Amino acid sequence: MLEVLIRHDFGGFQLDAAFEAPAGVTCLFGRSGAGKTSVVRAVAGLLNADEARIVIGRQRVDPLPVHRRGIGYVFQEPRLFPHMDVRGNLSYARAGADAGPVVEMLGIGHLLDRRPADLSGGEAQRVAIGRALLSKPRLLLLDEPLAALDEARKAEILPYLERVRDAARVPVLYVSHSVAEVARLATTLVALEQGRVVRVGPATELLSDPDIAPVIGIRDAGALVTARVVRHHDDGLTELACSGGALWLPHVAADEGAQVRVRIEAQDVMLSRALPEGISALNVLPVRLSALRDGDGPGVMVQVVAGDDRLLARVTQRSAKAMGLSEGWCGYAVVKSVAVASGNVSR
Amino acid sequence: MTGWLGPAEWQAVALSLRVAVVATLLSLPLGIAVAWVLARKRFPGHAVLNGVVHLPLILPPVVTGYLLLISFGPQAGLGGWLEAMGLGVAFRWTGAALAAAIMAFPLMVRAIRLALEAVDPGLEEAAATLGASRWRVFYSVTLPLIAPGVLTGAILAFAKAMGEFGATITFVSNIPGETRTVPSAIYAFLQVPGGEASAWRLVIVSVVIAMGALLASELLARRVAARIGGRDA
């Protein structure tokens, strides 16, 4: 359990954020300048906020100085100590943790004798994550740890972050402005706007809420669907089962029987009144319309229910009118297999 | 070298080395502390402290020496008290070291402060989140990173202390074997007929020591920088 309340007057910018989150990964999401970094800096004690109340588990940590809070912090830049080798950096915290499993999990065993100056950006960030984990933190703060990396490096590190989430059993507060990262990692989502918390809730629920689309950006909106891998087929497709029916996606890197979460972007979902025939799209799920929200432009954000899962679809107001879309409407959602990139599927 | 240098000359060289080493080593911790305060802290007296530290650099050395004399001389309150404790500095080699340290202090602080300002505070923050107390952050992260600057500051201070003349001669006079450092000795030799040869030898020694210190600092600084910057070259 994590409980955070931060109030601070920056002179012109007021930060007033409060939220509670269960165990798992809590993503602080918002545009740059929304105050995300200030919140985590205050949680760590690096920002002396006017008013703070931070409870981790059952302990209140805000009266403690930074070095006594037991909070691991991974910054945007690796911030490795340049005068120590990787081994020295990893053991800096002296928390008595066994480095072996962490080193193996992050794949940094071959780097131990190197100096930070000789590491690539991705390697350095992995070492920084390991260094924070080896301080045996009660809470791990990750402040846009991928922001300084290019796309290839991001894709390289994300699986390691998933492993940290699954293996470390440490609550994580993750700052990001990337919906893709949030969708892959978040258990709980905290949406921040201009220094204030606008929404808090389970990530799957919030991401499929049409009302949150303006906060995360209409083009990035998309719901999370939980699915189980059924079979990998010879033609390069993977068959999955979700509560609403079968899903066919380009090869998913997970074992048969494994649970995955799939982000389906709202603009990739098409709605149809009748069961469409003779179309190239492989995924057709029977759905019922559960919520609808008019946007500022010509679009409408529609939430539909497929089994126990929810999908978001973005259609034009013209189509909505022509099809008579309203709550309780029943029809079909159509998703092209190839629209779901491999980065949108995670464990 | 004792064969080449006369006893009086050798005495001056040995004294100068002792004065410069003691002045540098004893003022180094204070120099680091003052540089840290000036680089990292903002407080009402900041400009005043900065000014006081730099004063010896801009005041005529004779003025600094005179101020030392009236505060540390045997008649002064502070000097009398030190004298009673057996720590009197007036007209002693320790006084020469004090004068040298004060004259060299601004150079030392400047070099260390520059190095401190170049340290990424983000590294110190990271160390704190890893459980390091302020003191541990300082000696395990900050100090190693400013080592080249500390070294430069110490060498500059040493060189300045070796050459200090005005404040020293005003404060502790020019007593052979006690306060006659190399510059004072050169000055004294030039005052007597036939002293040029001795003066010249001391000039050569001065140049050699100065060049040696400079080379040593360059070499050490390069080593330290290589250790910090990665690549064990």
Image: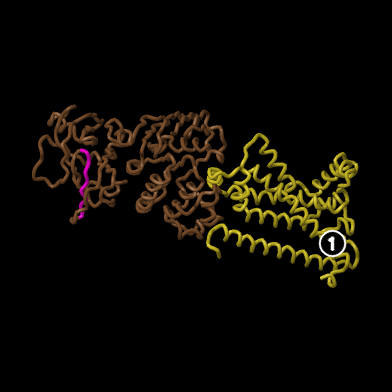
Chain colours: A brown, B yellow
Q: Is residue B60 left or right of residue A3?
A: right
Q: Position of residue B79 (x, y in %)?
A: 87, 43
Quadrant housing residue A334: top left
Taking the view exactly as shown, the residue that stands out farthest to the bottom is: B3
Q: Is residue B120 visible?
A: no
Q: Which SS does the magenta portion mostly show?
A: strand
Kindly identify the residue that appears in the image at 73 percent across and 62 percent down.
B210
For the record, the magenta segment spans A236-243
Residue situated in front as seen by the camera: A52 or B6 = A52
Question: Residue A256 placed where, x, y %?
Answer: 25, 50
Vertical placement of A237 versus A326: above or below?
below
- The residue positioned 66% from the left and 56% from the top of the image is B152
User: Which three-letter amino acid code belongs to the residue tagged 1?
Assistant: Ala
The residue lying at 37 percent from left, 33 percent from top is A191
Secondary structure of residue under mark 1 = helix
Q: Magenta includes A25?
A: no
Spot occupied by residue A332 in the image (x, y as percentages of width and height): 15, 37
Give coordinates of residue A198: x percent, y percent: 37, 29
Q: Quadrant of the N terminus of chain A?
A: top left
Q: Which residue is mark 1?
A: B12
Asked if residue A145 can be seen in this view, the reply is yes
For the image, the number of numbered tags is 1
Residue density around tag 1, few if under 14, some if 14–19, many if 20 or more, within 10 Å: many
Chain of residue at mark 1: B
Which residue sits furthest front? A257
User: In the image, is A222 to the left or to the right of B27?
Assistant: left
In the rendered image, the residue lying farthest to the top is A327
